Image (cartoon, grey):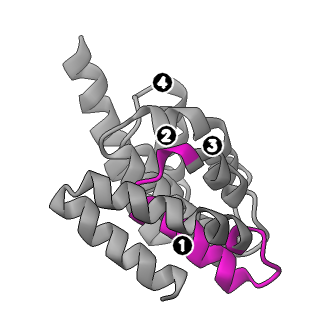
Amino acid sequence: MSLQEAAAQAEALAQAGSERELSQLRAQWDDELEAAARSSDFRERAVAFRAVGLFRWRAKEELLRRGLDDGSPAARGSALLSLELLSRDHPSTVNSVRPLLHKMLADEDENSAVRRLAVLVLKNGSAPRDTIVLLEGLAADDDADADLRKAAGTVAQSLKRKAQDKR
């Protein structure tokens, strides 16, 4: 079985609520995932970063942080997909990498799909003012692509509602 197949199996176990089996699968694939994340092949790194989310592997969040700085857009995108999945139930996941997400958006990651994914990850975190301002700026940026502007505007509005609901 490949790491990708194991990740698919982990996703099924997580959805079924089979925590014990999922834990056993994590233990079985720990070394292989770490090795794949350090591979010179961007495709292997991308699979590894995506697998972290599918395994619901909260202990590997630092690995995802490294994935956000990867030279490959595919690897960065996979790390973002995993962060989005992990942060659905735990906003602290987004909050811990918020500065990196802001940097990806403000420094204009060269890949627009990666930037859109970074915007979507932010929706699961808390709603600090600097994030909302950054997203509103992206939404109004005529130089940004239309999909990014739309995603940024939608997430900014969602975070504003979240901030108002806390009051």
Q: Which residue is painted at 62% across and 54% down in the image? A: 64
Mark seen at residue 113: 1
**139 in relation to 12, above or below:** above
Residue type indicated by callout 3:
His
Q: Residues within 10 Å of mark 2 (few under 14, many from 20)?
A: many
Left or right: residue 150 compared with residue 109: left
Residue type indicated by callout 2:
Val
Q: Which residues are magenta?
A: 36-59
Judged by depth in the image, the label closer to the viewer, 2 or 1, is 2
Q: Contact (CB < 8 A) between labels 4 and 2? A: no
Q: Spatial distance from mark 1 to mark 4, Cα to Cα?
A: 24 Å
Residue type indicated by callout 1:
Ala
Q: Spatial distance from mark 4 to mark 3, Cα to Cα?
A: 12 Å
Of mark 2 and mark 3, the one earlier in the sequence is 2
User: Label 2, on which residue?
Assistant: 94
**137 in relation to 22, above or below:** above
Q: Residues within 10 Å of mark 4 (few under 14, many from 20)?
A: few
The number of numbered badges drawn on the structure is 4
Judged by depth in the image, the label closer to the viewer, 4 or 2, is 2
Q: Find residue 7 and report its image quarter.
A: bottom left
Judged by depth in the image, the label closer to the viewer, 4 or 3, is 3
Residue type indicated by callout 4:
Arg
